Amino acid sequence: MTLLTDLEDFSLELCGAAAEVAVPIFRAGCGHDDKGRGRVFDPVTQADRDAEAAIRRRIAARFPDHGVIGEEYGEDRPNAEWVWILDPIDGTRAFISGLPLWTTLVALRHQKEVVVGTVAAPALGEVFCGGASGAVRLRDGVREAIRCRPCPRLGAATLSTTDPALFQGPARDGWSRLEAATRLTRLGCDAYAYAMVAAGRMDLVAEAGLKPWDWAAPMALVRAAGGRVQAWDGQEPNGESSLLAVGDPALFEPARALLAG
């Protein structure tokens, strides 16, 4: 427990290193490139690249035997016992639009199991961390325990996804069924939505086409707060996955049935 708690604290340090790079650039008019293919706009900024580089330097200095998987710079020893999984700016579309809901995602995998997940919202001054010691929210030096809220009925639930336009074919139909069954839908929150599930403010997040750096940290955070997170088929996420996160585990099977049709 002591080792994992120390590693949870180190994940907070890594998010702080990314924030030192990204926050001064946010709303400063930084340019961006489009790394998307076809019709999907997938922006990347120098803040993404520099923030991930800053995180990797901290890891190399503290834990040179740990592996790293990151969105911007790929894999370094992905089969190591301990592997950090990084998304320096999740929600780059929000970042370049001046919206404060972008996050830094830092997860730690031990022998193929994700054991720490940290979701930082630097523009809001918040960090959410989940691991063996539970789930917490940190703001202004105050650390408070958080927990998913009870919500056993879809008809009373608040649902989120980043953008329904990202769902294609049967996935879009499944999303429409799930949205119709819930009470309230909020869009455009990116990974911050998972933090709100962990904090007991929202109830479900459904997303498709996520890479490991997108889902690893949110999954660990929501699970540490008492929720359930799986792929849409009910299995563990692996590689590119469609993810369903619920605060109340009773919501999972009804929601999954609607997504599956």
Image: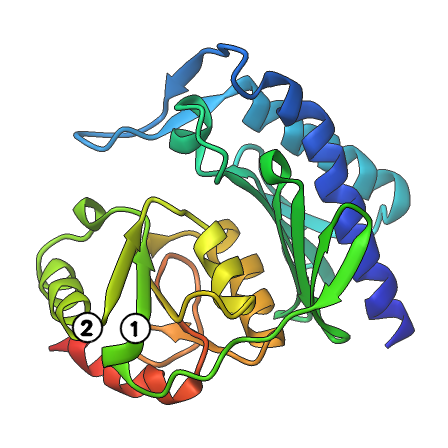
Tell me the tag on residue 141.
Answer: none
Name the colour scheme.
rainbow
User: In which quadrant will I find the N terminus?
Assistant: bottom right
Q: Seen in the image, is 60 located left or right of residue 177?
A: right
Residue ID for mark 2: 259
| Figure disc tally | 2
Q: Mark 1 or 2, which is nearer the eye?
A: 2
Residue 80 placement (x, y as % from top left): 72, 59
Question: Residue at point 37% right, 89% down?
Answer: 250
Question: Residue at point 46% right, 84% down?
Answer: 150
Q: Seen in the image, is 84 located left or right of residue 140?
A: left
Q: Secondary structure at mark 1?
A: loop
In this view of the protein, which residue sits in the foreground, 50 or 158? 158
Q: 40 above or below 213?
A: above
Question: Residue at point 34% right, 82% down?
Answer: 252
Tag 1–tag 2 contact (CB < 8 Å)? yes
Q: Amino acid at mark 2?
A: Leu
Residue 27 placement (x, y as % from top left): 52, 17
Rounded to the nearest angstrom, the CA distance separating label 1 from label 2 is 7 Å
Is residue 174 in sight in this rendering?
A: yes
Label 1 crowd (10 A; few <14 / some 14-19 / many >=20):
many
Residue ID for mark 1: 232
Residue 5 placement (x, y as % from top left): 84, 67
Question: Residue at point 50% right, 34% down?
Answer: 100
Residue 247 placement (x, y as % from top left): 46, 76
Is residue 81 in sight in this rendering?
A: no
Q: Amino acid at mark 1?
A: Trp
In this view of the protein, which residue sits in the foreground, 133 or 109? 133
Q: Seen in the image, is 222 located left or right of residue 115?
A: left
